[in-house]
Amino acid sequence: MNESNKIYDLEERTAVFGESVLKLVKQVKMGDYNKSIISQLIRSATSVGANYMEANGAESKKDFIHKISICKKEAREVKYWLRMLVRVNSEVSDKARLIWQEAQELTLIFSKILISSKGNKKII
């Protein structure tokens, strides 16, 4: 996603993020290595948006912080699984790099939300 078409609605942005991972893994041949990597990658990428939706419906500040923490954790996990996917499927490295960058940006966004929510205590 380039700067000119950034999505600033975080619900939509996290949904598009999950969709971009789904689109990426459809291009990868399922095999012994890929099966578990793809499964983990899909789980973590789609969890970001699902937990963000949960955070928006949180019943308390504590619940909100917990869900946003999960969003951050899952976004970081996506970066790991993308690295593993590219290790065994170098042909998708350019597309994976773009998704990795979005995962990094989401991680930073969720870190900032957590800092603001917790009263400016550093969490990164």
Image (cartoon, grey):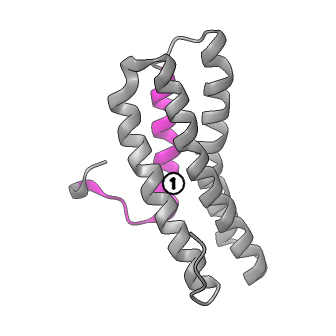
Report which residue position mark 1 lands on.
14
Q: Residue 38 location in percent, x, y?
A: 61, 26
- The residue lying furthest to the left in this view is 4
Q: Residues within 10 Å of mark 1 (few under 14, many from 20)?
A: many
Please tell me which residue lies in front, 106 or 79. Answer: 79
Q: Position of residue 60 (x, y in %)?
A: 77, 82
Please state if 90 lies on the left or on the right of 30 as rendered. left
Amino acid under disc 1 = Thr
Nearest the camera: 48 or 12? 48
Q: Which residues are magenta?
A: 5-26
Residue pictured at 39% horizontal, 48% vertical: 101
Q: Quadrant of the C terminus?
A: bottom right
Dot 1 lies on which element?
helix
For the point 42% across and 58% down, the residue is 105
Q: Is residue 14 magenta?
A: yes
The correct choice, above or below, for 70 with respect to 24 in the image is below
In the image: residue 75, left or right of residue 32: left
